[in-house]
Image: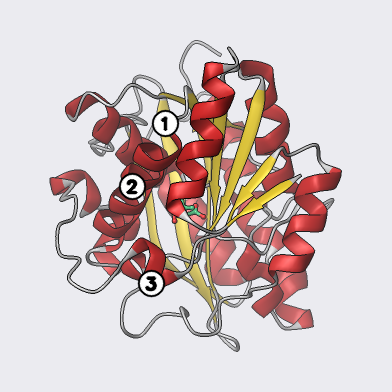
Amino acid sequence: MKIIKSIVEMREYASALKADGKSVGLVPTMGALHAGHLSLLARVRDFCDKSVMSVFVNPTQFGPAEDFAKYPRDLGRDCGLAESAGCDCVFAPSAEEMYPEGYGVGVSVGPIGDTLCGAARPGHFNGVATVVLKLFNIVSPQAAVFGAKDAQQVAVIKRVVADLNVPVRVITAPIVREADGLAMSSRNVYLTRPERERAANISKSLFEAKALFEGGEQSVERIKERVASIINGALMKTEYVEIVDPASLRPFDKVIDGAALIAVACRTLESKTRLIDNIVVDCLH
Ligand code: PAF
């Protein structure tokens, strides 16, 4: 597996693959890899001949009070995992390589970045969209895979690709869960042991919401209340529970009458870890 740190070298590697008739798929990550990330690699190989995984903890998507400094970083471990999952190339640039002296232009995603997670993380999705567009311009992949756990990120990237005519196919891979249902996340390592045990209630609340919906409950208010009561009852604090259109992220008003994304964000009380999860429900199913 190739490990590349320079943008020039990354471009050369990707161009050589393309000249050789190979399609290239990109899996953008911030490292601290887990089985969820490796499932993205497996998915990209369904669509492309060669896979590039970027590992870059992107400073522009962290707010001043967020965990940029303590975000787990271990490139050696990540490269070992990526290689064993069949990755062809890890692109791991430095912050100076991506944002050199004088850097100033970024993507502004508009209102889709202001709801859900964006309400508590102003500017976060501008930072995500900017770095993803930069990665697209550096790697020129035919396809890129993103995990469904970050549902708003997927919606934002799809908007960027559509609105800015970016020739990349955006593929979503399903959420990968621990045995007790907790969605895999690089931030799960922050949890204390009791918090880790209680964190399974987040997915439990979403599975219950889906069961309620499939049992005939369509009231947005009642489903949201049930989700919030399970999470808050497990000593976590919900930041939001929302039921929205999966593409536009516009909230359903009173009843769910189409495909809907039920999305939650909450914080644990002790380590103050912020966790997100979601589930999609649809009237047709
Ligand atoms: O999902 C992530 O890990 C990041 O937001 C991404 C897409 C790699 C951009 O930094």
- Residue at the spot of label 2: 134
Q: Amino acid at mark 1?
A: Ser
**Which corner quadrant of the image does residue 248 belong to?**
top left
Q: Can you say whether 5 is above or below 168 in the image?
A: below
Neighbours of disc 3 within 10 Å: few (<14), some (14-19), many (20+)? few
- Residue at the spot of label 3: 96
Residue 211: give x, y in percent of width and height: 62, 33
Q: Amino acid at mark 3?
A: Glu
Mark 2 vs mark 3: give the one in front: 3
Give whichever of 182, 129 is nearer the camera: 129
For the N terminus, which image quadrant? top right
Give whichever of 193, 126 is nearer the camera: 126
Which residue is found at the position 68% from the left and 66% from the top? Answer: 199
- Residue at the spot of label 1: 140
Q: Can you say whether 3 is above or below 246 in the image?
A: below
Disc 2 beta carbon < 8 A from ligand 1? no
Residue 145 seen in this snapshot: no
Residue 176: give x, y in percent of width and height: 70, 43
Q: Is residue 257 left or right of residue 106?
A: right
Q: Is residue 252 left or right of residue 46?
A: left
Residue 70: give x, y in percent of width and height: 55, 84
For marks 2 and 3, give the CA distance: 14 Å
Q: Earlier in the sequence, mark 1 or mark 2?
A: 2
Is disc 2 placed on a helix, strand or loop?
Answer: helix
Marks 1,2: beta carbons within 8 A: no
Which residue is found at the position 67% from the left and 47% from the top? Answer: 37
Give whichever of 250, 56 is nearer the camera: 56
Q: Can you say whether 71 is above or below 6 in the image?
A: below
